[in-house]
Image (tube, rainbow, N blue to C red):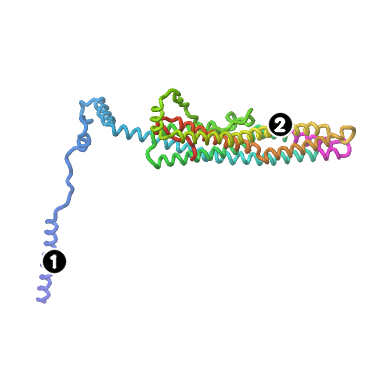
């Protein structure tokens, strides 16, 4: 019994000492509290300025003058100008990217117009000619004959109207215009990407890109009504999709030989190189451009002839279908109707199935490429210094 009391007393004294040591240990630990600064943060922020915005006696004009002094430093001005120019350039880049997609989609749509209108007109024409033939062989002169005549006349009228519209707009030529525009806008997009990759674009780059976009809009307009290019011009003219260069004044013929040699040294050209380049342009004019011009005029004449011949034959078939009869001397009119309708379908297939308008537009584009080569060489030779020398190509 005594041993139990001694052990209990020993345990109680040990636990008391342990608790006391733990409490004293926590008392000796120091709390790590971050030191709070008593200074005013707004005063530190505005230490670089001469005015304090929270003082009561400071006027708003003093704050404005302080901010203007900070913004009018040369570094800030250059940064603001560069940022504005880059923003303009990127905005134009987004516009060019959208135009690539728009011209691509519109080109597909107008190519579908050509296929669908061609098939529809030919089917309507052949159906109307078949009805006229059946009306000529229909016995009697009752309601069946009248129904066949009326149906064939209405179908011929519809086919004539559709053919007139199709010949006016030339869907195959419209599709080729949009394909060329897509190609040129893609070239411009690639050049803009290269400009951004090489560094910050300048204001001159922005103006140059704007001129090129406007020139492409004039050469290949996107809307159809009110802005469509003339499909049957008086003569063949090559397409112009680049900004026309400013006319540079030619040097006076009375200059001394020394001044001419100094000019050659400045622009990096020699007289021999200039003569070679001019010979290249003359050969291109004499051979390639004249060939494209001659072929373009021929295709233009063929297109005009087919555009007139098709609706004329369709009109003859329409008038002949009204007088189709199976008795009397009117019985031979069905031959005229059938022949005119069949020839109209053949002419329509040759014109739009052969895509004569697309061929004409192809010659215009090729002629424009040669004209661009000629103007680029001439402007390059007329530049006076290397700094003024810059290419005017849209596509390399």
Which of pointers 1 and 2 indicates the residue nearer the eye?
A: 2
Of residues 306 and 296, which is closer to you in this image?
Answer: 296
Find the distance from the CA under tag 1 to the CA under tag 2. 120 Å
Where is residue 196, by image quadrant? top left
**Observer able to see residue 76:** yes
Q: Is residue 151 left or right of residue 95?
A: right
The answer to whether mark 1 and mark 2 are in CB contact below 8 A is: no
Q: Which mark is residue 308?
A: 2
Instruction: Give the dominant element type of the magenta stretch: helix, strand or loop.
Output: helix
Q: Is residue 356 left or right of residue 312?
A: left
Of residues 296 and 5, which is closer to you in this image?
Answer: 296
Q: Residue at x 51, y 39 (%)?
A: 100
* Residues rendered magenta in the picture: 132-158
x and y percentages locating residue 47 in the rendered image:
20, 34
Q: Residue at x 45, y 30 (%)?
A: 382
x and y percentages locating residue 141 in the rendered image:
87, 35
Q: Which residue is mark 1?
A: 15
Q: Residue at x 59, y 31 (%)?
A: 237
Label 2 Cα crowd, 10 Å radius (few <14 / some 14-19 / many 20+): few
Is residue 224 found inside the magenta-colored segment of the image? no
Q: Residue at x 47, y 27 (%)?
A: 246
Q: Secondary structure at mark 1?
A: helix
Q: Which mark is residue 251?
A: none
Establish if 131 lies above or below 235.
below
Where is residue 160, by image quadrant? top right
x and y percentages locating residue 51 in the rendered image:
21, 29
**Observer able to see residue 387:** no
Label 1 Cα crowd, 10 Å radius (few <14 / some 14-19 / many 20+): few
x and y percentages locating residue 366 in the rendered image:
57, 37
Establish if 59 lies above or below 196.
above
Q: Is residue 57 left or right of residue 174?
A: left
Is residue 142 found inside the magenta-colored segment of the image? yes
């Amino acid at each position: 019994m005594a041993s139990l009391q001694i052990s209990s007393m020993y345990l109680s004294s040990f636990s008391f000492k342990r608790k006391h040591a733990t409490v004293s240990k926590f008392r000796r630990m120091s709390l790590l509290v971050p030191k709070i600064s008593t200074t005013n943060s707004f005063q530190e922020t505005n230490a670089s300025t001469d005015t304090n915005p929270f003082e009561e006696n400071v006027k708003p004009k003093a704050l404005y003058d302080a901010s203007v002094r900070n913004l009018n430093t040369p570094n800030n001005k250059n940064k603001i100008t560069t940022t504005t120019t880059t923003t303009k350039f990127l905005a134009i880049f987004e516009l060019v990217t959208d135009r690539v997609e728009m011209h691509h989609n519109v080109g597909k749509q107008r190519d579908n117009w050509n296929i669908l209108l061609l098939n529809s007109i030919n089917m309507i024409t052949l159906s109307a000619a078949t009805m006229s033939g059946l009306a000529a062989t229909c016995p009697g002169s009752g309601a069946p004959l009248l129904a066949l005549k009326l149906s064939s006349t209405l179908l011929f009228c519809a086919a004539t109207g559709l053919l007139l519209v199709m010949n006016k707009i030339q869907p195959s030529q419209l599709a080729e215009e949009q394909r060329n525009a897509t190609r040129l806008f893609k070239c411009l997009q690639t050049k803009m990407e290269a400009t951004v990759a090489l560094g910050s674009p300048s204001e001159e780059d922005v103006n140059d890109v704007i001129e090129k976009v406007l020139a492409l809009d004039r050469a290949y307009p996107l809307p159809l009504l009110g802005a469509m290019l003339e499909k049957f011009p008086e003569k063949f003219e090559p397409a112009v999709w680049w900004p026309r260069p400013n006319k540079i004044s030619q040097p006076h013929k009375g200059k001394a030989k020394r001044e001419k040699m100094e000019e050659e040294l400045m622009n990096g050209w020699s007289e021999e190189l200039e003569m070679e380049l001019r010979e290249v342009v003359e050969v291109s004019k004499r051979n390639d451009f004249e060939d494209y011009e001659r072929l373009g005029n021929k295709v233009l004449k063929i297109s005009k002839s087919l555009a007139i011949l098709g609706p004329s034959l369709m009109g003859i078939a329409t008038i002949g279908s009204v007088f189709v009869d199976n008795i009397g001397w009117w019985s031979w009119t069905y031959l005229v109707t059938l022949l005119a309708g069949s020839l109209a379908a053949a002419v329509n297939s040759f014109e739009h199935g052969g895509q004569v308008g697309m061929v004409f537009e192809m010659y215009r584009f090729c002629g424009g490429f040669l004209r661009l080569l000629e103007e680029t060489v001439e402007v390059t030779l007329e530049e006076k210094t290397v700094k003024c020398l810059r290419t005017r190509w849209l596509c390399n």
